[in-house]
Image (cartoon, coloured by chain):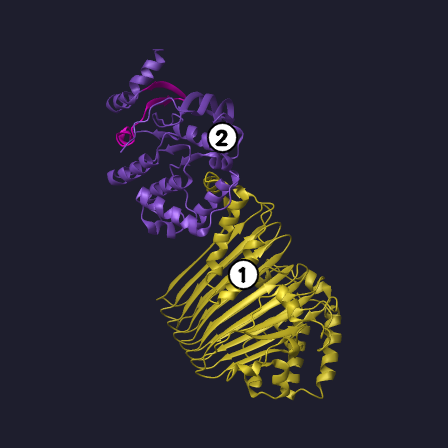
């Protein structure tokens, strides 16, 4: 079942406006792509029906669908926002190449000079469209396709700005590239559609951070799509920070296409949003490709986070490591799903998939359903999921050494989270995450297991 | 070497008629025990006699319900205190089965424990450097592998390593009253000697040790001033070190028969 098209009202109006506006400026292929995406979204709607829909079984998008978010304000409407505002809500480092987006639009006055990064081609998507950068038509929407699902189609229908990072073959990018997507709250109830395209040329190396943050005080919707293309022998280090406000909806779709002997290490850190969905698909599309995906989510109140991670071992000698951890307080809920698919030809696949959850309250809930689908016979695969409370015996042991329950719990939660935070190689980011996850940790309503 | 500590020090622990149950089942049925500074007491008894319960109740394990009696530590009502307060005031339980703390660095854990104790005493936290120095001294004192404190607390430790780590924690926290719950179980003779040496080095005239054990073996290394036999939740015999030897030779049955006969 899909949503009745009439309910797509605000989106329809928004799309019509964009279509007319872009007619004079944007290339035909892009207008066609948007049109195709809109038709697709119009047909699919939001995935509100859960029965028989394994991908959305545990996550209810009805509140999101019913909210009818508006188009974001036009570009250039926020000259008053400063770097200091961003420092309050996002990791910030002057030595990184920072690209800031306000309500989906590139904010030149807050962004470093992308061209100073030398050979590495970093531009806003809007600039890349205006300059008719040929890489767009080749790669954009080829990895996250509009057939994927309604959210990708919706993002593509409204595709106009974001980041393009085109690392030339053999280039080692010295400075991390930090993409900061900010919802400003200057317009209530707005949606934004960040879009990122990264091409890591053969044997290149680059570090990319995506931060989704908020200065807003009420509800909004971020619908982000990220496409990574790793050419042969390239190495990408990737971080994704989900720090939306407590009333926000966030749907982030990430598609990674990997060439021969390429590798990605990616770590996702999530604290924000009322409802968040992170949908990641990695295609290990050539021999020797490997990926390591780590994640840490911490939720409280009535937050809901859904991680769907699919890894496609399409070729032999590919390796994947998936390690997610969750810390859940209050009445929050986490969903972890996804499949490691090992195709018939993908002999010598080496795959591990783990999801561990620490429940701090009786009312928090986890639905963890990692799965393996194996068609090759010479493989090494494992998976596991756990969920549990802080152990009472362990707590007594720590109390018997002089620590009160709260201090002991903090130490245990810290240790639990550190296992993921410690994988971060960027030191300033690691310090930031330490503070974010450890100093502001929820311990008010702790409940313990037996 | 073992110091020969005599009695006559300050009373550290005074237990009177202590009864405790777990899940409605009465385990301790009126235990009396007085421990003075400078003394070593051995609590012996067959399996299921309530030895570990006694140790755990003194440390404040929450599973037990106190149904009667009292325990005073330096005159204060021990049983009314949270476990962490007991620890900070100087009561230490070496666990029979020390728990693993995955990912918790031993250094961080011990520093937090020491700082909690200092805070209770109104002292400032130790600087990292001062703590480092102190920890190093204690590691040498109890002859433990320095690599153990670089790892997560007890994570993946062998049984012997866990027991040694308990003694290191004891050395760091310098308790007035150390209760060792079957610390000798599962130790080979070398490990038993190292652990015992550690305990002996930590003994002085102002602290005391309560050794809870099934076997007399550890008493060859840590000489007790008094030996008590706990049976069916009560101390049924008390005596000097010779009582332990007698138990070693004759087992526990003769005491049980004597008790049953009202002798």
Q: Which chain is indicated by disc 1?
A: A
Residue A362: x %, y % from top left: 58, 45
In this picture, which residue range is highlighted in magenta? Answer: B216-239
A360 above or below A75?
A: above
Of the pair B248 and A346, the residue shown nearer to us? B248
| Residue visible at 32% across and 36% down in the picture | B201
Residue pointed to by mark 1:
A433
Does the magenta segment cover residue B78?
A: no
Q: Which chain is indicated by disc 2?
A: B
Q: CA distance from mark 2 to mark 1?
A: 40 Å
Residue pointed to by mark 2:
B64
- Dot in front, 2 or 1: 1
Of the pair A447 and A110, the residue shown nearer to us? A110
As helix, strand or loop, the secondary structure at mark 2 comes to loop
Q: Quadrant of residue A92?
A: bottom right
| Residue visible at 56% across and 88% down in the picture | A134
Of the pair A213 and A356, the residue shown nearer to us? A213
Q: Which chain is tinted purple?
A: B
B172 above or below A306?
A: above
Residue A215: x %, y % from top left: 68, 65
Asked whether residue A47 is in view, the answer is: no
Does the magenta segment cover residue B236?
A: yes
Quarter the N terminus of chain A occupies: bottom right
Residue A438: x %, y % from top left: 54, 55
């Amino acid at each position: 079942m899909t949503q009745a098209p009439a309910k797509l009202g605000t989106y329809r109006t928004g799309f019509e406006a964009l279509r007319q506006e872009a007619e004079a400026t944007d290339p035909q292929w892009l207008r066609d792509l948007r049109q195709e995406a809109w038709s697709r979204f119009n047909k699919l709607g939001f995935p509100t029906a859960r029965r028989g829909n394994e991908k959305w079984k545990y996550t209810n998008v009805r509140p999101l669908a019913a909210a009818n978010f508006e188009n974001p304000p036009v570009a250039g409407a926020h000259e008053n926002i400063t770097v200091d505002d961003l420092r309050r809500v996002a990791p910030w480092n002057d030595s990184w190449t920072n690209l800031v987006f306000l309500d989906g639009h590139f904010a030149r006055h807050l962004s470093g000079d992308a061209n100073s990064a030398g050979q590495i081609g970093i531009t806003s998507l809007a600039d890349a469209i205006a300059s008719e950068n040929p890489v767009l038509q080749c790669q954009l929407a080829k990895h996250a396709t509009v057939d994927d699902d309604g959210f990708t189609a919706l993002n593509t229908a409204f595709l106009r700005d974001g980041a393009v990072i085109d690392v030339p073959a053999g280039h080692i990018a010295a400075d991390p590239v930090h993409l900061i997507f900010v919802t400003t709250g200057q317009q209530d109830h707005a949606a934004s559609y960040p879009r990122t395209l990264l091409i890591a040329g053969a044997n290149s190396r680059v570090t990319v951070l995506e931060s989704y943050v908020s200065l807003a005080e009420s509800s909004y919707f971020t619908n982000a799509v990220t496409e990574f293309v790793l050419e042969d022998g390239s190495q990408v280090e990737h971080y994704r920070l989900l720090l939306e406000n407590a009333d926000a909806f966030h749907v982030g779709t990430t598609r990674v296409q990997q060439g021969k002997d390429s590798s990605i290490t990616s770590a996702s850190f999530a604290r924000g949003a009322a409802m968040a969905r992170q949908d990641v698909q990695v295609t290990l599309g050539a021999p020797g490709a490997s990926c390591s995906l780590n994640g840490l989510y911490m939720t409280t109140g009535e937050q809901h986070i859904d991680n769907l991670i699919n890894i496609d071992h399409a070729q032999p000698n590919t390796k994947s490591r998936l390690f997610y951890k969750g810390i859940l307080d209050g009445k929050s809920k986490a969903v972890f799903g996804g499949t490691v698919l090992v195709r018939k030809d993908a002999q010598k696949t080496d795959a591990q998939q783990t999801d561990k959850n620490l429940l701090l309250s009786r009312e928090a809930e986890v639905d963890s359903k990692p799965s393996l689908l194996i068609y090759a016979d010479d493989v090494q695969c494992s998976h596991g999921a756990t969920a549990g409370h802080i152990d009472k015996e362990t707590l007594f042991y720590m109390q018997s050494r002089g620590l009160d329950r709260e201090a002991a719990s903090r130490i245990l939660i810290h240790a639990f989270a550190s296992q993921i935070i410690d994988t971060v190689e960027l030191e300033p980011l690691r310090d930031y995450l330490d503070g974010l996850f450890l100093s502001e940790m929820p311990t008010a309503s702790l409940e313990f297991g037996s | 070497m073992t110091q020969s500590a005599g009695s006559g020090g300050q009373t550290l622990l005074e237990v009177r008629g202590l009864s405790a149950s777990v899940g409605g089942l009465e385990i301790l049925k009126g235990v009396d025990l007085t421990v003075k500074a400078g003394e070593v007491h051995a609590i012996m008894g067959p399996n299921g006699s309530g030895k570990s319960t006694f140790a755990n109740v003194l440390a404040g394990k929450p599973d037990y319900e106190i149904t009667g009696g009292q325990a005073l530590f330096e005159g204060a009502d021990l049983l009314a205190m949270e476990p962490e307060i007991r620890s900070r005031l100087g009561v230490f339980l070496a666990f029979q089965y020390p728990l693993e703390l995955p990912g918790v660095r031993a250094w961080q854990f011990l520093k937090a424990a020491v700082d909690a104790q200092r805070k209770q005493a109104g002292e400032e936290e130790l600087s990292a450097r001062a703590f480092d120095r102190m920890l190093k001294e204690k590691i040498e004192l109890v002859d433990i592998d320095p690599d153990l404190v670089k790892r997560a607390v007890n994570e993946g430790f062998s049984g012997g390593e866990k027991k040694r780590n308990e003694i290191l924690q004891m050395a760091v926290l310098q308790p007035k009253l150390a209760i060792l719950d079957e610390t000798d179980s599962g130790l080979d003779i070398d490990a038993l000697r190292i652990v015992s040496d550690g305990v002996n080095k930590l003994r002085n005239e102002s602290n005391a040790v309560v050794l809870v054990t099934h076997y007399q073996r550890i008493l060859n290394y840590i000489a007790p001033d008094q030996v008590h036999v706990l049976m069916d939740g009560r101390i049924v015999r008390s005596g000097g070190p010779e009582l332990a030897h007698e138990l070693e030779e004759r087992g526990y049955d003769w005491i049980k028969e004597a008790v049953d006969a009202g002798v």
